[in-house]
Amino acid sequence: MVFKNSTALLRSFVFCFFVVTCTLPFFSCKDKPKTPKPKETPPPVVDVIIAAHSPVTNSIEANGTVLANEYVELHPEVSGRITYLNVKEGDHVEKGTVIARINDADLAAQLQKSKVQLEIAQKTEDRYKKLLEINGINQSDYDAALNIVEGLKADIAYTQTLMDKTIIRAPFSGTVGLRQVSPGAFVTSTNIIASIQQLDKIKIDFTIPEQYSNLIKKGGVVEVEVDAAKQIRKKAIIIATEPQINQNSRNLSVRTILQNGTANPGSYVKVFLTSEVDKKAIMIPTNSIIPDDKNNQVVLVKDGKAAFVNVQTGLRSANNVEITKGISPGDSIVVTGVLFVRPKTAVQVRSVKKLEDLSK
């Protein structure tokens, strides 16, 4: 009886275990959470411009330096003490005006001595000449007396030249600068007494790359920005160019004369050179160019997707650059959101811009 009940209990236990084992996977699978699908990333939003030909002026900007028409630093030619100084700082002086004198007392004494010796030598030469006419002396004695006279005349001329060097005169009419020495100072040829500049004409020198040398012609006109704060431009006439290109910088040196304008010599100015012929070109914003190791690229929108193309650039302005190859009129060029675009991926065009609006 006990054995029979045990068998029934075992059967009941096996049946319950079978039922639980079969139904457990069903409930486990039913309650397992589903993995969510990843959301699709929206396409980047960009603005574009439509490529079109527009007139472009070939304008070259160069750095220039203002020069006085004439400029010189006044140095004494001889060493000595300054006995006279006539430097009126900032005033206009005429050519030949005495600026300074160097002590010449020793030279004046030497000159006076030579003049006395010359007077005596000339009297001796006159007597020898009369004696030579009557054969009272031979020719060699007369020639020696004449040689002494000529030597003294040369000494007087030399001493007079040294005395002239003690007088410093204005070499041309102009404006005197600041005085660098005081009366009574001992000066040598290395000392600067003052400077003098001729400001009735103002020269402007500038350099440009050699590829633009065909734009430079004698008598041509350039624009010079003499006042950067007010952005005032004046015209300047090209008067000369350096015949040889600088071998280090490969630049051409140009000199112009400023018309109807003033500027301080030594100051920095901007020179603008414009070609005579305008041409048609495709211009795009500079920041839409993607620089690469070998090529420059821009992003076009074709059939709603981004297309990266290689381009060649030409003239540049402050904000735009010319495209000479790689883009055709009518192409849609991405100008904003360039960094978020990937090749052959969809893009969303927000608006079509104009080149003038992007330059503001």
Image (tube, rainbow, N blue to C red):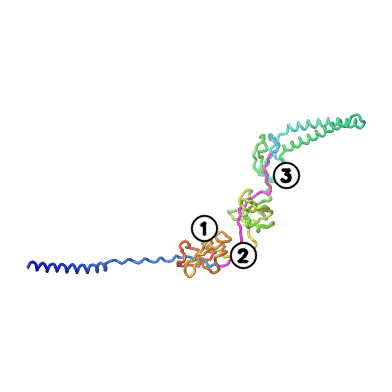
The residue wearing badge 2 is 279
**In the current view of this chain or complex, which residue is farthest to the front?**
3
Residue at left 61%, top 59%? 59
On the image, the x and y values in percent for residue 323 come to 56, 63
Q: Which of labels 1 and 2 is toward the front? A: 1
Q: Which type of secondary structure does the marked residue at label 3 adopt?
A: loop
On the image, the x and y values in percent for residue 254 come to 66, 53
Using the image, determine if residue 160 lies above or below residue 310.
above
Between the residue at mark 1 and the residue at mark 2, the CA separation in whole angstroms equals: 30 Å
The residue wearing badge 3 is 95
Q: Which type of secondary structure does the marked residue at label 1 adopt?
A: loop
Marked residue nearer the N-terminal end (1 or 2):
2
Q: Which of labels 3 and 2 is toward the front? A: 2
Between the residue at mark 3 and the residue at mark 2, the CA separation in whole angstroms equals: 51 Å
Using the image, determine if residue 270 lies above or below residue 2.
above
Q: Main secondary structure of the magenta part?
A: strand
On the image, the x and y values in percent for residue 276 come to 65, 62
On the image, the x and y values in percent for residue 192 come to 66, 40
Between the residue at mark 1 and the residue at mark 3, the CA separation in whole angstroms equals: 62 Å
Can I make out residue 257 in this image?
no
Q: Is residue 38 magenta?
A: no
Q: Amino acid at mark 2?
A: Lys
**In the current view of this chain or complex, which residue is farthest to the top?**
136
Q: Which residues are magenta?
A: 52-75
Q: Amino acid at mark 3?
A: Lys
Residue at left 48%, top 70%? 303
Q: Mark 2 packing: few (<14 Cα in 10 Å), some, or many (20+)?
A: few
Rendering quarter of residue 235? bottom right
**282 displayed left or right of 184:** left
Between 231 and 336, the one lying in front of the other is 336
**96 displayed left or right of 57:** right
The residue wearing badge 1 is 293
